[in-house]
Image: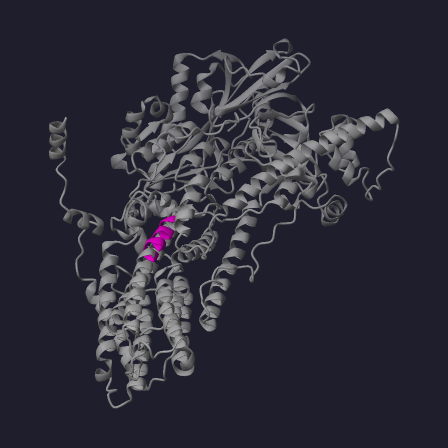
Amino acid sequence: MAGGQQPEASPGRYQRRRDDDCADVLGIDVRGPDADPFDIPAKRAPVERLRRWRQAALVLNASRRFRYTLDLKKEEEKEQIRRKIRAHAQVIRAALLFKEAGEKQNGDRELPEILPRGFGIGEEQLTVMTRDHNYSALQEYGGVKGLANLLKTNLEKGIHGDEADLSCRANAFGANRYPRKKGRSFWGIKEGWYDGTSIAFAVFLVILVTAVSDYKQSLQFQHLNEEKQNIQVEVIRGGRRIQVSIFDIVVGDVVALKIGDQVPADGVVISSHSLAIDESSMTGESKIVMKDQKTPFLMAGCKVADGYGTMLVTAVGLNTEWGLLMASISEDNNEETPLQVRLNGVATFIGIVGLSVAAMVLVVLFARYFSGHTTNSDGSVQFVKGRTSVKSAIFGSIKILTVAVTIVVVAVPEGLPLAVTLTLAYSMRKMMADKALVRRLSACETMGSATTICSDKTGTLTLNQMTVVQSIVGEVKQQAPANIDNLSPSVVSLLLEGIAQNTSGSVFEAQDGSIEITGSPTEKAILAWGLELRMKFTEERSQSAIIHVSPFNSEKKRAGVAVAVSDSDVHVHWKGAAEIVLALCTSWIGVDGSIHEMTPDKVNQLKKFIEDMAEKSLRCIAFAYRNLGLEDVPSEEQRINWQLPDNDLTLIGIAGMKDPCRPEVREAVELCKKAGVKVRMVTGDNLKTARAIALECGILEASDASAQDIIEGSVFRAYNDSEREDVAERISVMARSSPNDKLLLVKALKKRGHVVAVTGDGTNDAPALHEADIGLAMGIQGTEVAKESSDIIILDDNFSSVVKVVRWGRSVYANIQKFIQFQLTVNVAALVINVVAAVSSGNVPLNAVQLLWVNLIMDTLGALALATEPPTDQLMRRPPVGRREPLVTNIMWRNLFIQAVFQVAVLLTLNFRGRNLLHLTQDTLEHSSKVKNTVIFNTFVLCQVFNEFNSRKPEELNIFSGVSRNHLFLGVVTITVVMQVIIIEFLGKFTSTVRLDWELWLVSVVIAFVSWPLAFVGKFIPVPKTQLKDLILGCWPKRDEGQDERRAESQV
């Protein structure tokens, strides 16, 4: 990313195949030429592909809008707004330049702006200067130093930073916030308003439950978006470097920038060292721009591509182009996930089946009605040709149409997409508590299929609390704490100069004598070591001046700085990976300051020292320098492209840093192994250190730590593509790896069919995070560039949080399966009962209102109950879910078949023999039919309530395990039962039911209760391992391809 190039497209990037569509979900081969619209990639699906499946999915139910899916029109509008604002900014700049030139020509002057109290410059003046990138105006104010004086800012120590100062600046120049587009209001949630016909009560229930559910999810997604945008920024206030929220930045703040950071506000550069800015997010051009005192203007929203520096904030909030842009567009989580697309495909397929059944029922009922075979409850014929009035015939036809439409309503399972949204939203909220911020919804479910995790070492597997515990300077080996008594002043001076100047960290000494060190963990460890060696940081920095900086990056694994120590001498200091820096050295410095040639024996001696430290899992950093004359240093204009010389170096010393493993990592790695997920460590450390840490974490076991398991990045990248794939399968540890090696590993593993999760924190990790199926950026150490490329941000940088994400990913998949089993059971039972009854007798036992209540139970309430089941330990004892495995497994088909057959058999028996079985023959035909139909309706609903418990545990015998902890499930079941009692006992006229006595209630409960022991016994029935789809395909005679070829040859 430092070069401004986008990561190359992976030739082996996973392409979803045609069998991953609605056919796969059901496990039945229903593929055809139109199956492709439901086929989208797991990440960043093209808009055209989304539009194609959307058109296919909405043909059946165009009046229904799938919840939380991407608004393609809105996305196009967003892009147009971006272009307009960019163009608008350019026009403003041109107009201001034109106006300024005219004023100079005519000598006109506008009335002076009223300046805010206490400041020497106004908000409008700052905004105009910054937006216009007006360098001459900046010079008129006295340059950066003069501007800082006008803003009452100390360029070294920053602003005071107390409450009064911050409040005064926010009032004078505005806050770094912008008005957000409003989310959905409660009444703006339209899904659910179309679900009814004229049956107000049923419709009201659907509206209420759906609106509340969708409104809560909308608020939740809004909260998650705010969390994503709440970036932590390093500022200097009162001489201290502190982390503050991007929203708390004020005009006059001094902000420290480093590679990978996002520029938090508009401003000007104070100091810079190879500071390169990627302005593509604002200008639309992917061009890296170098920033220094001559081109000092920085725009909010841009990324630091390389180097580091400090900036003075001059405009915040809506006074920046970024603020205008963000206020004009709303950032939604409305994206399709692969699971959602597959389920929408299933919903359409089932809907087509329901539509076909409804059409058949419509034809049969019309035929029976107009042929005089349909009777009323008292036995009289409903339609007699020549006698029945037109009005009665129309009412009879409407009644038949209502039955057919209701069958379609019940058959179309719009609860499937809702169930995905609910379980994803629930999982996202819980994952936040487990220190994982989801940036892309699809990552939740993809994580459940992960087969391998490529993890960084530092900070993820380790505590990221580094300390120097061993060192060698000159020929003196030291253990912590270090001292300088045995070293000559010249050696100590060189070492401390290299530590103090060649760093991106800082040391703050408070008035009370306390010391605060800031920077990366490595920088903090080195600076703390310097303090042990009696370094005075501020004093050391003032004794020499930095001329040029070569910032650290993961490719070269070293950082350099050139400092002027006198009028004629320049020292170039380097620090970095010990064996890499050692290879650049041709001499070494002795205890007394004398320089000695680096002989092969000395090299071997130092390598042995490095290996010994590495075997103790120490990270080794070497320090070296070389002298330059001022004549060897380019002029200031040419210095921007100057490559610091890194040859003929003199070794000063080597430090070994300890970064202990996190105590919970070993257990997390073991859990991954049991779950069938292989953990691979990818680190920049050397082979010995990597092996020691991997053994400590449990990634390697002493018995299998062979050469095939551990490899260096340089060796891996030297292989060709096919060799790399074979080697990648065996790798457990990759040492001395570069970000490009990590990218090659991800590509190789994906070609082998793995679902790959990758952790990363650096800017150069962005291509690997982008390429992986799931990119996991580190929240503490991760750069903004890495976070932008990731799917999930691990907020505590802890590997055990990564494992929790895997657990939640599996939970999403499992919850959807539970809901599908429940919903399909209701679908099959309701359709079969009504169709058989309609065809045989012309009447249906379940009328429109009753079916809409059942629809509410199985869609919205069922989704609420089953989609919010928390994950169990059982999920981590299974292998990962394959990408192309059908959602409905053979076990689910078995459970579904048993329950559906039981419900259909019992309810059809009640429908045809109910009067005799329930002893209703003494009543009138009309009343007994109403009682019988009420018992059928009551029994059917109670069967679904009992079956909800069965659906919780499709594979386990104990269906009540953990039920007491799921309060939402118990609440939904209770509401369903209470509403059912109210409907039967008090809403009879509305639902065409009658009150039932306690005996008939008992009959309904007992019949429904039977589903529990039936499910228990059914789980002992073995199921074939071959998927149902393959079993069905196996029944078809296979074509003899050889015979076809012979026939073709004979024709030729």
In the image, is residue 545 above or below residue 440?
above
Q: Residue at x 36, y 84 (%)?
A: 995
The x, y position of residue 519, in whole percent, is: 57, 35
Of residues 486 and 310, the one drawn nearer to the viewer in this rendering: 310
The x, y position of residue 643, in whole percent, is: 55, 16
Q: Is residue 742 left or right of residue 731?
A: right
The x, y position of residue 424, in whole percent, is: 43, 53
Start-end of magenta stretch: 341-351
In the image, is residue 462 above or below residue 935?
above
**From where the camera sits, is residue 597 visible?**
yes
In the image, is residue 629 above or below residue 410?
above
- The overriding secondary structure of the stretch rendered in magenta is helix
The x, y position of residue 298, in whole percent, is: 66, 32
Residue furthest to the bottom: 922
Asked if residue 342 is among those painted magenta in the image, a careful observer would answer yes
**Which quadrant of the view contains residue 757?**
top left
Of residues 312 and 36, the one drawn nearer to the viewer in this rendering: 36
Q: How is the image coloured?
A: one colour
Q: Residue at x 78, y 30 (%)?
A: 146
**Which quadrant of the view contains residue 941?**
bottom left
**Which quadrant of the view contains residue 540?**
top right
In the image, is residue 936 above or below residue 648?
below
Asked if residue 276 is among those painted magenta in the image, a careful observer would answer no
